Image (cartoon, rainbow, N blue to C red):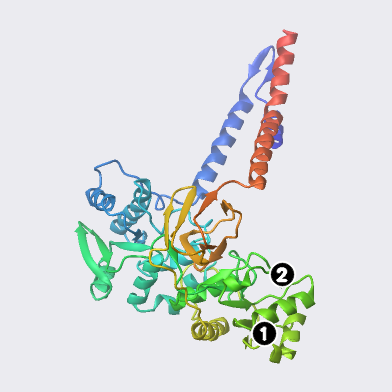
Amino acid sequence: TAGFRRLTSFLDRRKPNNGEISFRRARYTTGLAIALFLLIALSAPDLSWAYAFYAAGQKKDIDSVLAFSSQHRDGRYLVEVINPKRGPAWTEASFDARALNSYLGAQGNETIGGVFHEASPNVLFTLPTVNAFSDYPDSFGISSVLADDLDFVSQPLEQHIARARFLGVKYLVIRTPAMKERLGKATGLAARHDFGWWSVYELRDNPPPLVATLPFKPALVVSSFTVKARRRNETSFIRLAEEQFADNWFDVLLVRSPEAKVDRLARLNDFGALILDTYEYENETAAFDLLREYSQSHPLILLSSDAKLCQRIKAARSRFPKLQIIERSAEESGPILEAVAPSYHYQAASIRQQWLAMRRILDNNKEAINPATGLISGRVEQNTIAIEYGSRSQGQMVPVVVSTMFHPNWHRDDGEALYAATPFYMLTFVDRSVRLLFERQRADKSALWISTVTLVLLGTYAFWPNLRKSRKLSNNS
């Protein structure tokens, strides 16, 4: 605003000339404005390929797919991403794919892809899965090992189908002949429905319910958390969850600890194993004793570190019956993940080898959950999730996973903990019926009020001098 005022003051169009007004500088102002507009317009990125909306009845193939999906809501949809740059026909097909994603969501179906995806941690897992069924990698704006992994892309199609099912997918919406040919040779598909150029493939097995009991106790992971500007060899909870996802092994889900300090970890017996990547604490002795007690009956997995607590446990490992140490050597963190397209083989990466060792330990020590039949059921709505607990369960504590993205604004009505689990789903432990509610936190509400007040102040700053000048001219007249 201040810069614009200075510019308009310099290019003031009112120049007295024998009592008349000259508009010479007005032409300069107009010309400059047009030049700036053209500069901005010509330098702006072309987003015409990114968005597509059609009038009803304009695209019969799309209308047919939407009509089918309106009658089939028993699972999520995965829509193939089309390369828009291979020619006019492909550009049109890419429009159709994005329109399908938009309209499926608009009519109440669920998809695992979307146009605006960078803000969701789930996208680190869902986009690489969609890319596995597409001829064009759509990984813009994310730092994902899976999207960067050549070995992940080259896995057999059956593994990608099983992984999509784990994400709740029931239907694959496919356009390109090459992918249709691959799916024609794949197992795990029950039916194919053709609608012009588009085909909908129905998976043979139903996806897991949105609210389900885990078959085994999960493993609690104490590690750092980062989703942006990640590096290739950087260990974090997300990286370990990506390794589990790439391995397509979900018997023992990895769960992120919201508490980083070891001595403050609570309810450890709810978890079948504890994995430590970081070693923060307030009281070292309390942390040591807590881990020693836990290891008497549960696997304690340490990723080796020079941290004092890790070294102390190593020196006293005879006092930790179920201690497992996975050695790791110091290495460079590597470049920042661009992940625009697969570019690196991770099969021999050190973190993948560490995960495989971790999986063997978890698989050999997994602790089964044996709830009564029909113990857990649930209902997922926009801002409420109901978890119904069977009346004949006798208060058994059960780990329940909710197949929707974890967010800190979700909370239980009884105040108990919620956790993020692979692939960034929500997990909680229940021994009775509970409700999860999505509500703005106090910080969110404060930020909204600060933004509103700031907007009013900026508006006042922008318009007040003009109002004051107009009032002054009015008084003078």
Does residue 131 show up?
A: no
* Left or right for 218, reference 331: left
Q: Please name whichever residue, 387 or 170, is drawn nearer the observer in this view of the structure.
A: 387
Q: Which residue is mark 1?
A: 304
Q: What amino acid type should be assigned to the residue bearing mark 1?
A: Ser
The secondary structure type at the circle numbered 1 is: loop
Q: Residue at x 53, y 59 (%)?
A: 406
Q: Which mark is residue 261?
A: 2
The percent position of residue 122, horizontal first and vertical second, equals: 49, 62
**Can you see residue 386?**
yes
Residues 262 and 462: in front is: 262
Which residue is pictured at 34% across the width and 59% down the height? 75
Whether pointer 1 and pointer 2 mark residues with C-beta atoms closer than 8 Å, the reply is no
Tell me which amino acid carries mark 2: Lys
Name the side, left or right, on which 135 lies relative to 384: left
Q: Number of marks in the image?
A: 2
Residue name at image x 74 percent, y 9 percent: 475
For residue 451, what is the image quadrant?
top right
Above or below residue 241? Residue 211 is above
In front: label 1 or label 2: 2
| Residue located farthest toward the top when viewing the structure as drawn | 477
Q: Position of residue 336 (x, y in %)?
A: 60, 70
The quadrant of the rendering that contains the C terminus is top right
Against 54, is 365 above or below? below
Residue at 35% over, 45% down: 53
